[in-house]
Image (cartoon, grey):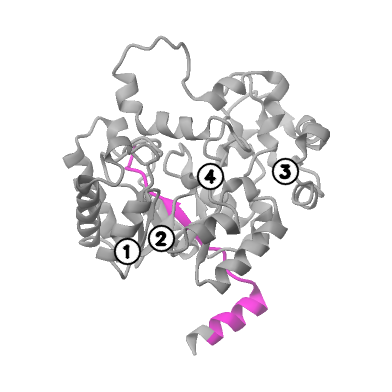
Amino acid sequence: MASFWNQLKNKIFGKRLQFAVGYQLPGEMNRYDMVDLIGQYRKHISEVFFAMPGDASGRVPVGSRKGMSVEEADERLFADLDRLAAMNLPGVLLFNSSCYGGEYGSESLVKHVAKSIEEAEKHIRLRAVTVISLPLAEAVKKSFPELKVRSSINMHIGTIQQMSLLSKYFDGFYLNRDYNRDLEHIRRVRQWCDENGKSLHLLANSGCIYQCPHHHYHENIVAHIDEIVSKESAYKGTLAPCFRMLKDKSIQFWVLRNTWIRPEDIRNYVDLFDTIKLATRESTEPEYTLLAYTTEKWNSNLLDILEPGHGNVEGMPLVINSRFPEDWFEHTTHCGHHCDSCNYCKTVFEKVSKIPQAFSMLS
């Protein structure tokens, strides 16, 4: 009966937007206590995803930026998971490193994952785990049959053929972000997922370059940043490939070619995905992201709500979200990403960009 009334309410008033939000330790990347912030937006949040301290997960390991030991970071994380559980929020635990190397499929890695799940479940109800390793997916399904296993977005799975090949390993898939602006493709994938009992998940605010040739490499850099900075580097400046490339003013308009979805357009995706994920684990201003997507409106610098945002790339102008043309969504979801023969994004970039004079939120 409750399900019937919820469906009826959704038809009359529109489905409420709810988001999956990434956890970060208090003060690690910003001034916020992330749990307090999540509490303020609780009605808009359906789950919280997190990695265990010390684990490589496509992001800087939890606690390392604050110089915390794994034990210290564990203590704070578990206390925060208790607080999230008190809000009746489920968790999604990440094992999405693309660089397990010699540990891939090892007994020690499987035992580490099992122990991590058991520890996390003492503090929060886990809805799912997100993995990148097929042996891990198989091991989790065997040892924790009640847990849903989702493919990591770092696997770049975006087609029905790929999902069919991996169907026995995963209960749900994070869609390759490069397909975010192809609604017809998404609808076909959604239909296949429905017919095969799979969930489908979206990452809405990725700032990553469309079809970036350095994507996997960049994920490895971030996951191993502690090891990298401990060594003398022969490479001057940032190691992040996209930040280096976008210093070239002639290609800065490429930030519009990417895979992000404007807050004003997110409503078009709510019926196509089971969850809409907001990247906030490395955001310096996660409240901007939550505010923008929950209100479906953002008038300031679009780069402030993306991860990575590229707003601090040398010479990068502000991208004023309120200046986008009315045909933006219609055009970019039907253009087929034929960027080699189209100047639409370059033309729009000239209209929406602004050389910063002060802090972007005041612009």
Hey, what amino acid is under mark 4? Answer: Tyr
Magenta includes 32? no
Q: Residues within 10 Å of mark 1 (few under 14, many from 20)?
A: some
- Residue 80 in the image, given as x and y percentages of width and height: 28, 53
- Left or right: residue 356 versus residue 144 is right
Task: Return the mark for residue 322.
Answer: 3
Magenta includes 25? yes
Q: Nearer the viewer, mark 3 or mark 1?
A: 1
| Cα distance in 3D space between marks 3 and 1 | 45 Å
Q: Earlier in the sequence, mark 3 or mark 1?
A: 1
Q: Residues within 10 Å of mark 3 (few under 14, many from 20)?
A: some
- Left or right: residue 121 versus residue 225 is left
Element at badge 2?
A: loop
Q: Quadrant of residue 349?
A: top right
- Residue 261 in the image, given as x and y percentages of width and height: 64, 49
Which quadrant, please, contains the C terminus?
top right
What residue span does the magenta drawing correspond to?
Answer: 4-27
**What residue do we see at 36% from left, 44% from top?**
24
| Cα distance in 3D space between marks 4 and 1 | 37 Å
Element at badge 4?
A: helix
Q: Are marks 3 and 2 in contact (CB under 8 Å)?
A: no
| Residue at mark 1 | 141
Task: Return the mark for residue 288.
Answer: 4
| Residue at mark 2 | 169
